[in-house]
Amino acid sequence: MQKKLILVFFILLFIVTNRSDVYETRVVHADSDVSLLDSSDSFDIVNASDQNYSKSPKYWSEWPILPSNISEQMKELYWRGIQQGNDPHAFSVVGDCQSNPQIFMGKFDSEVDPLDEKFRNLMDTIENFHGSFNRMSVTVRDGQSVASVLSPEWADPERCDADESPIVCEFRLHKPSIVFINLGTNWNSGNESAHADYLREIVRFVLDHGAVPILSSKGDNQEGGHRINRATAEVAEEFGVPFWNFWRTLHDLPGKGIDDTRPGGYLTAEGWNRHSYSGLQALDAVWKALSK
């Protein structure tokens, strides 16, 4: 009997120790102070060519802001997609209400002079994708999640066929060559494994249609432990697709860019501003790497 009690004690000790380790890597590490004031990685002067993904998705919070190291395989897929009819001047966005062009990059189409002097090097990217910035993708909708974008029930009945999901409809209408995937805030269950499974379906669809997805981290942490951002990083690494670490751009802002006066993980006004400018930088980095 005594031997059995000793065995049970060590089993319980093993379980608690491992759970503590998981908790630390998912929560404490992700909430560590990541400053954007370091001159080599500040929001204003991010240089994609200096970035690398040497650390595993476990340390996604230390991954660079901008995507880099675009593989030759991804470049081949991009050009093959264009040869098959994708538009090299079109990108699409898959996201919720915070990806609406009214607050996410739409101004780069609608404003006459949308860039500050420090961002002038991005003007050729704006010119190349003119018309996509202020376009409302059928894959952008209030409450959108990784599951709903695959469901015909969430498609726009005025723009999509009866049996089309939003993602299928978007590719038929717009034929994008690059696709932002900005999802996770509305994944209310917080189950990161299920989120990752649906995200894989979306990524496979985009790749199968010859377009390059840009997966982004989100600014909020409604699920706790930043589990959705880690899962997104894992999918990005699994498929070898670009990862835009938007979350890192917010950490010098009050409240880390999240509006604490309203529920739902909404960004503040300055958070939205950074979402747009950082998104443009991510698009610029990926497009220019693919075009080489």
Image (spheres, rainbow, N blue to C red):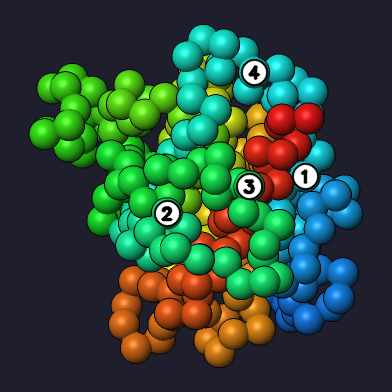
- The quarter of the rendered structure image containing the N terminus is bottom right
Crowdedness of circle 2 by 10 Å Cα count: few (<14), some, many (20+)?
some
Mark-to-mark CA distance, 2 and 3: 13 Å
Q: Which residue is mark 1?
A: 68
Q: How many marks?
A: 4
Q: Earlier in the sequence, mark 2 or mark 1?
A: 1
Q: Which residue is mark 4?
A: 79
Q: Is residue 40 above or below residue 22?
A: below
Q: Earlier in the sequence, mark 4 or mark 1?
A: 1
Mark-to-mark CA distance, 4 and 1: 18 Å
**Residue 19 or residue 42, whichever sits in front:** 42
Mark-to-mark CA distance, 4 and 3: 19 Å
Q: Residue type at mark 3?
A: Asp
Q: Is residue 53 above or below residue 250?
A: above
Q: Residue type at mark 4?
A: Trp
Q: Position of residue 77 (x, y in %)?
A: 65, 18
Q: Which residue is mark 3?
A: 124
- The quarter of the rendered structure image containing the C terminus is top right
Q: Residue type at mark 2?
A: Asp
Q: Which mark is residue 109?
A: 2
Crowdedness of circle 1 by 10 Å Cα count: few (<14), some, many (20+)?
many
